[in-house]
Image: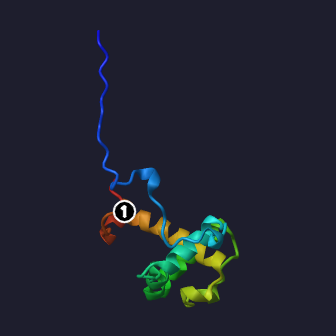
Amino acid sequence: MGRAALVANIDESVKTFTQIHLVHVRVDAVEKMTFSEFQQAWRKMRKNNDNPALRYFNRQNDDFKFCVMTLANRERPTTFRQDEIGRPFESFTETQREMIIVAMNKMCRWGRIILCQFSVADSFLSE
């Protein structure tokens, strides 16, 4: 059997992947950061820099905030006190805000599990 070679003409004006260079990047300006620091920096760089956790927590009533803080207190007891229920999201420490977000995410999951409201008539038990 004969051997055949595949010859292809490569246009020199087309750059291959290895020839692509980054423009406007300073290597000396790159700092090592933790993932948490990266998340914060990324959030600040985004054009839409709103904070949905802050917005949703602050617009809820005190009953919702009580449930969130009670749920968070189950993980770390005495983190939240009863007199803190009406406070806005931004008044808490970063650790407390993280706990609030975790608790709100748990409650959000419950909302998908329990799809409807229950009737008070369901309080009676049949024999």
Q: Quadrant of residue 39?
A: bottom right
Which residue is nearer to you in this view: 106 or 4?
A: 4
Q: Is residue 86 above or below residue 21?
A: below
Residue that protrudes farthest toward the top in the picture: 1
Q: Circle 1 sits on which residue?
A: 112
Can you see residue 27?
yes
Q: Amino acid at mark 1?
A: Arg
Residue at point 50% right, 76% down?
A: 43
For this view, does 71 lie left or right of residue 58? right
Q: Quadrant of residue 83?
A: bottom right
Residue at point 33% right, 71% down?
A: 120
Q: Quadrant of residue 40?
A: bottom right
Q: Is residue 32 above or below residue 14?
A: below
Which residue is nearer to you in this view: 96 or 51?
A: 51
Can you see residue 72?
no
Can you give x and y, in whole percent of width and height, for residue 104 in the image? 49, 72
Can you give x and y, in whole percent of width and height, for residue 90 in the image? 57, 87
Can you give x and y, in whole percent of width and height, for residue 103 in the image? 53, 70
Q: Is residue 10 above or below residue 26?
A: above
Q: Is residue 14 above or below residue 4?
A: below
Residue at point 54% right, 89% down?
A: 88
